[in-house]
Image (cartoon, rainbow, N blue to C red):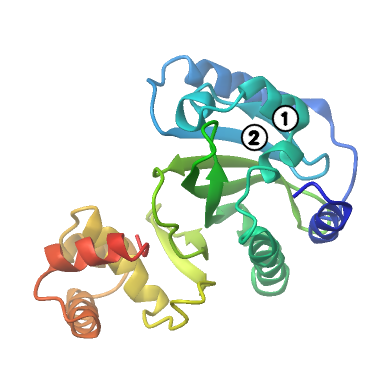
Amino acid sequence: MQNPEFVNIYDEVFETIKELKGDVIETHIQRLKELDKLIPPSAMFFCITNTTKRSFEFVSKNFSYATGLDRKKMEDEGMTYWWSRYHPDEANIWLKVLSELMEFTLDEIPFEDRKRVSYIWNYSIKNSKDKYLNVTQHTTPMYFDDEGKPVIGLAHYSVTGSGDRIPMKSTALILNANDEYETIYYKNYSQHLLENKYSHRERDILRLLSLGHSTSEIAKKLFISEHTVHTHRKNILAKTDCQNITELVAKCIRDGLL
C-alpha cells in the first residue's frame, strides 16, 4: 500500500495548495480534544484529515480501542500508515472511490453548496491481531482551497468488527433546510452486487425508517408528501420481497445498505 504509484494517484486526486495557516486547523483540534475527554470507549473514533500533507492532524483516543493499533504511530506516520492496513483487494477500488467522488463534487456541486455535503465510504482494515475489520468512514469537509477542493476534513469512523467484508460503496449527502441529509450520489463497487436498484430518495427513506421515524416525520424532513413516502415504502418492500418494515431494515443492514 505504501508504493509510490498509490501515493501519486492520491496526490492527483487531491492536488491543491500545499501550505495552510496553522490556525485553520488548530481551532478545531482544541475543540475536539475537549470533546474527546468526555467520550467513553467505543468502536467509533474520529480524526482531522489533511489531504495536502496526507496526515492526520488529530486522532481521537478510541482509535486504539477500536483497532488495537498505535494511536501515536497513526499521528506520526499519517495516511501512509493507515493505507498500509488496507485489505489488498480493496486498495485500487478505494482510489477509484475517491477519484469519482472528487469528480462528482467539482462537476456537479456548486461551490457554495459544498460546505453542506458529507461523504461516506467503507473498506477493510487489518487490526493489531491481523484480522480485517469493516470500517465505514463518514467525512465532512471543513476547509476548501480556492478551486473548491476539500483540504481539511472531520472524519468519523465506525468499526463494525471482523467477518465477511461488506460491499464497498460510496455516498454523497447534502444537508437540507431541515438539517436532514439527502442522498445526491451513490455507487456500489462490489463485483457481487452490481445492481443499484434503489433510488436516492428510497435510500433516504430507508435510512430514516431504520432510525424509527414515522411516515409523517419523514415527509416533513424531506419536504415531500406523506403519500409520496407511503408510495416509496410500498415500492421498496416490493423490490426486496419483504413483508414489513422491520424485515426490510434487517435485510438492508445485512446487505450493507444501511
Name the residue located 67 percent from the left edge and 58 percent from the top edge.
91
Q: Position of residue 238 (x, y in %)?
A: 19, 85
Which mark sits nearer the N-terminus, 2 or 1? 1
What residue would you read off at disc 1? 25
Disc 1 secondary structure class: helix
Quadrant in which the C terminus is drawn: bottom left
Disc 2 secondary structure class: strand
Image position of 48 with respect to 231: above or below: above
Q: Position of residue 96 (x, y in %)?
A: 68, 67
Assess whether mark 1 and mark 2 are in contact (beta carbons under 8 angstroms).
yes
What residue would you read off at disc 2? 48
Identify residue type, mark 2: Ile
Q: Is residue 236 left or right of residue 75?
A: left
Name the residue located 41 percent from the left edge and 33 percent from the top edge.
43
Q: CA distance from mark 2 to mark 1?
A: 8 Å
Task: Compare residues 224 and 67 and report the one nearer the observer.
Answer: 67
Name the residue located 38 percent from the left edge and 28 percent from the top edge.
42
